[in-house]
Image (spheres, rainbow, N blue to C red):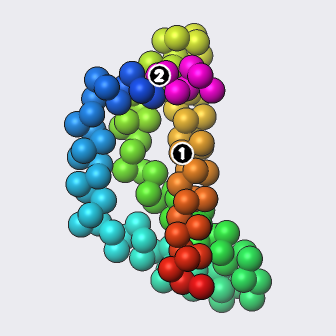
Amino acid sequence: MNVYYQSYLKSLKKNFMLVIMALVLLIPTFFIWAGVPFFIIGVAVENITTNPFLVYISISLSGGLLFSLYFVPTNLKAAKNMADKTGYDVVKSLICIQTIFIIVCSVIFGMISNIIVP
């Protein structure tokens, strides 16, 4: 975890403009990455099953996935730094970093959606 943390900090220090661009893009596209999980994926899963837990999980995972797509360039830079330090392949490092980012974003998106929409 320390290697991941150090490589991510190194890539953020060198390429902070990528984060600024991602944050700026999140504002006008709010209804895409926040609306699609609720209104399209949530309704589709609710038509398939009546289990509210599955609907909640699908909304959380799709929201985390769509949110994390904006940070792929930043995660790619961190994966390159991590691959240089550890000797792993860049693609394997990117998959690892992106998976962690999707899970963290899904948990945060799920907690926020649970607070806003009870």
* Residue 91 visible at all: no
Q: Is residue 2 part of the magenta span, yes or no? A: yes
The segment highlighted magenta reads 1-7
Q: Is residue 19 visible?
A: yes
Question: Gap in Å between the C-alphas at discs 1 and 2?
Answer: 14 Å
Q: Left or right: where does residue 11 sit relative to residue 49?
A: left
- Which amino acid lies under the numbered mark 2 shown in the image of this protein? Ser
Q: Amino acid at mark 1?
A: Phe
Hey, which quadrant is residue 96 in on the image? Answer: top right
Give the image location of residue 70, x and y in percent.
37, 50
In the drawing, does residue 36 fall left or right of residue 99?
Answer: left
Magenta stretch, main secondary structure class: helix
From the image, tell me which residue sits under label 2: 7
Q: Secondary structure at mark 1?
A: helix
- Between 26 and 90, the one lying in front of the other is 26
Q: Position of residue 45 (x, y in %)?
A: 65, 80
Quadrant assignment, res 111? bottom right
Number of other residues with Cα within 10 Å of mark 2, as a class: few under 14, some 14 to 19, many 20 or more: many
Q: Earlier in the sequence, mark 1 or mark 2?
A: 2
Out of 15 and 50, give the one closest to the viewer: 15
User: At which x and y percent is residue 14?
Assistant: 28, 23
- Label annotation for residue 101: 1
